[in-house]
């Protein structure tokens, strides 16, 4: 059986559910609803790609018990992904709008006008929170020195700034990204002062929401730092126990929860509509789960080499198909997602004061991730020819 047929058999249910979800989105929000749901699903897929690769190597490890591998793959992963994607969006809207979660869902289903008014009035606070979180994700990713660069000149300069950040011993903050935090806080304070004083409300009214915008943006930055450092510290502490199976289980859960949360916050930069968010996150989560299952069944980890023009051989980490057919992951999809984070963060800051249609943010997200996938495929073809 060919690889494409195996892939289609594994993803058949996901494709069917995706079609059904897009039909539901069209019935609820027309063609704009379809585009918004598609954009949310694509963003979640992009942010989950690297995590799926980590899951692949972790679950394929020889010291990981087969019983727990099956439990995590068939029960644990769906519970983690779908739980975070479906529960947290409702919780965030409920907290910011100060409404009961049941009332939020009921209002979204029964009274679209009142729900739109509620989310529009709460949008400046939500947008500031999302912008703070996404800016932290953007700078944290590109401040790292990386072997693979998509936009060479820009990423090289950002990496140099990241090196300065590591040398900033004068900082009073107990984080390895102190300069990044100060820079983001200056942006948020500036945005809250300029945009927050004239926050856009339902009907085109502008009100002063400066303190709430500043507080929400700060909360977004702190939440990103908490999810990142909690994962790192807990894994370090657990590593001292030398319980390999427990360590791998903990790493699996923490990484997937963090990844799902990043994708959920990224989806909020596209739309605040709970129904469209749930449809898009549900589609993306299902494809993430199915792709994990497909990789575990059909693909094995490995390395291959490419020869440069100078005759030197470079080791490339990737995957090899059963039957010696070469397959490599999308090398730049994480870059595409984090560029999307940066652009959408700026758009969300601007949208605190000025109304920006959701269709614009969704198309920008789709375009950036599509470009990263195209560049990744071109890179894979070049490496395959050299190999």
Image (spheres, rainbow, N blue to C red):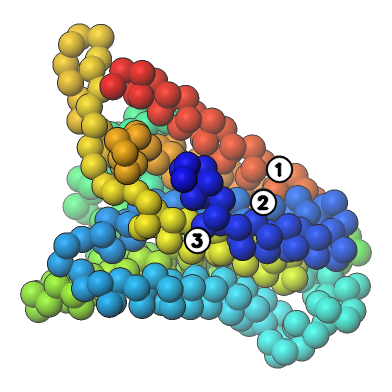
Q: Earlier in the sequence, mark 1 or mark 2?
A: 2
Q: Kindly check if marks 3 and 1 are in contact, taking CB atoms under 8 A apart as contact.
A: no
Q: Which marked residue is nearer to the observer: mark 3 or mark 2?
A: 3
> Residue 113, percent across and down?
91, 73
* Residue 306 in view here: yes
What's the CA distance linking mark 1 and mark 2? 7 Å
Classify 10 Å Cα crowding around label 2: few (below 14), some (14-19), many (20 and above): many
Which residue is painted at 72% across and 89% down in the image?
102
Q: Secondary structure at mark 2?
A: helix
Q: Which residue is mark 1?
A: 363
Q: Which residue is mark 2?
A: 39
Which residue is painted at 56% across and 41% down in the image?
369
Name the quadrant of the C terminus: top left
Q: Is residue 344 left or right of residue 68?
A: right
Classify 10 Å Cα crowding around label 3: few (below 14), some (14-19), many (20 and above): many
> Residue 147, percent across and down?
28, 34
> Residue 268, percent across and down?
63, 62
Q: Is residue 277 left or right of residue 258?
A: right
Up/down of 375 relative to 367, above or below:
above
Q: Kindly check if marks 1 and 2 are in contact, taking CB atoms under 8 A apart as contact.
A: yes
Q: Which marked residue is nearer to the observer: mark 3 or mark 1?
A: 3
Q: Which residue is mark 3?
A: 290
* Residue 159 in view here: no
Q: Earlier in the sequence, mark 3 or mark 2?
A: 2
Which residue is painted at 20% across and 61% down in the image?
61
Q: Secondary structure at mark 1?
A: helix
């Amino acid at each position: 059986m060919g690889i494409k047929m195996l892939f289609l058999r594994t993803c058949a249910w996901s494709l069917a559910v995706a079609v059904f979800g897009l039909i539901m989105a069209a019935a609820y929000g027309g063609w704009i609803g379809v585009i918004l749901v598609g954009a949310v699903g694509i963003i979640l897929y992009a942010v989950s790609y690297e995590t799926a690769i980590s899951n692949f190597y972790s679950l394929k490890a020889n010291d990981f018990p087969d019983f727990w591998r099956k439990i995590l793959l068939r029960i644990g992963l769906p519970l983690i992904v779908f739980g975070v994607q479906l529960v947290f969006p409702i919780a965030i809207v409920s907290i910011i709008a100060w409404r009961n979660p049941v009332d939020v869902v009921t209002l979204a289903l029964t009274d679209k006008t009142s729900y739109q008014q509620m989310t529009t009035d709460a949008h400046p606070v939500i947008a500031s929170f999302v912008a703070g979180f996404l800016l932290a994700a953007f700078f944290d990713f590109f401040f790292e020195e990386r072997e693979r660069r998509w936009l060479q000149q820009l990423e090289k300069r950002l990496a140099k700034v990241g090196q300065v950040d590591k040398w900033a011993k004068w900082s009073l903050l107990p984080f390895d990204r102190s300069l990044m935090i100060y820079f983001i806080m200056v942006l948020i304070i500036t945005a809250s002062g300029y945009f927050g004083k004239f926050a856009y409300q339902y009907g085109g009214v502008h009100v002063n929401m400066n303190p709430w915008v500043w507080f929400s943006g700060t909360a977004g930055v702190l939440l990103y730092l908490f999810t990142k450092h909690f994962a790192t510290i807990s894994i370090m502490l657990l590593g001292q126990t030398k319980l390999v199976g427990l360590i791998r289980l903990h790493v699996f859960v923490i990484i997937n929860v963090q990844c799902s949360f990043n994708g959920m916050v990224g989806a909020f930069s596209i739309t605040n509509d709970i129904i469209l968010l749930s449809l898009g996150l549900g589609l993306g989560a299902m494809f993430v789960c199915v792709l994990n299952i497909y990789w575990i069944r059909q693909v094995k980890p490995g390395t291959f080499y490419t020869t440069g023009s100078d005759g030197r051989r470079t080791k490339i980490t990737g995957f090899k198909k059963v039957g010696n057919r070469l397959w490599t992951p999308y090398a730049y999809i994480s870059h595409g997602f984090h560029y999307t984070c940066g652009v959408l963060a700026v758009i969300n800051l601007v949208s605190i004061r000025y109304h920006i249609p959701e269709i614009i943010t969704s198309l920008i997200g789709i375009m950036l991730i599509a470009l990263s996938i195209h560049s990744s495929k071109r890179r894979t073809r070049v490496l395959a020819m050299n190999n």
